[in-house]
Amino acid sequence: MQNLYALCAGLSVGLLFSWLRLPLPAPPTLTGIIGAAGVFLGSVSFGLLQQWLGR
């Protein structure tokens, strides 16, 4: 369950960091890695969302 929370938090952080144009963080633990994957997916989602909205 922690991994799911980390992924959701990571997606949120990825969207926020991409919106603010900040570098993406990447901690070294398993939960951190899953969170970092979420950050990456959030960043990619933000780019796709921008394309979909035509910005």
Image (cartoon, rainbow, N blue to C red):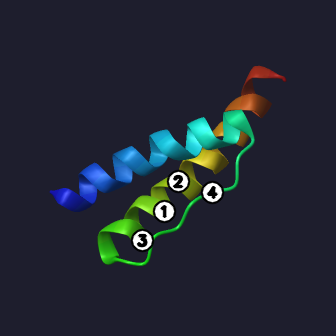
Mark 4 Cα shell of 10 Å, populated few (<14), some (14-19), many (≥20): some
Q: Name the secondary structure under disc 2.
A: helix
Residue at 52 percent across and 67 percent down: it is 26
Q: Which residue is mark 4?
A: 24
Labelled pair 3, 4 in contact (Cβ < 8 Å): no
Q: Specify which label sits upstream in the sequence, 4 or 2.
A: 4
Q: CB atoms at circles 1 and 4 under 8 Å apart?
A: yes
Question: What crowding class fits label 2: few (fewer than 14 Cα within 10 Å), some (14-19), or many (20 or more)?
Answer: many
Residue at 75% over, 30% down: 50
Query: Quick one: SS at disc 1?
Result: helix
Q: CA distance from mark 3 to mark 2?
A: 10 Å
Q: Residue tagged by mark 3?
A: 33
Looking at the image, tell me whether mark 1 or mark 4 is earlier in sequence order: 4
Which image quadrant: the C terminus? Answer: top right
Q: Please tell me the numbered disc located at residue 39.
A: 2
Mark 3–mark 4 distance (CA, rounded to whole Å): 12 Å
Q: Calculate the distance from the C-alpha at mark 3 to the C-alpha at mark 1.
A: 5 Å
Residue to which mark 1 is pinned: 36
Quarter of the image where one finds residue 1: bottom left
Q: For the residue carrying disc 1, how many other residues have a C-alpha within 10 Å: few (<14), some (14-19), or many (20+)?
A: many
> Seen in the image, is 34 located left or right of residue 11?
left
Residue 51 higher or lower than 14, as above or below? above
The amino acid type found where label 3 is placed reads Ile
Amino acid beneath label 2: Val
Q: Does label 3 or label 4 sit earlier along the sequence?
A: 4
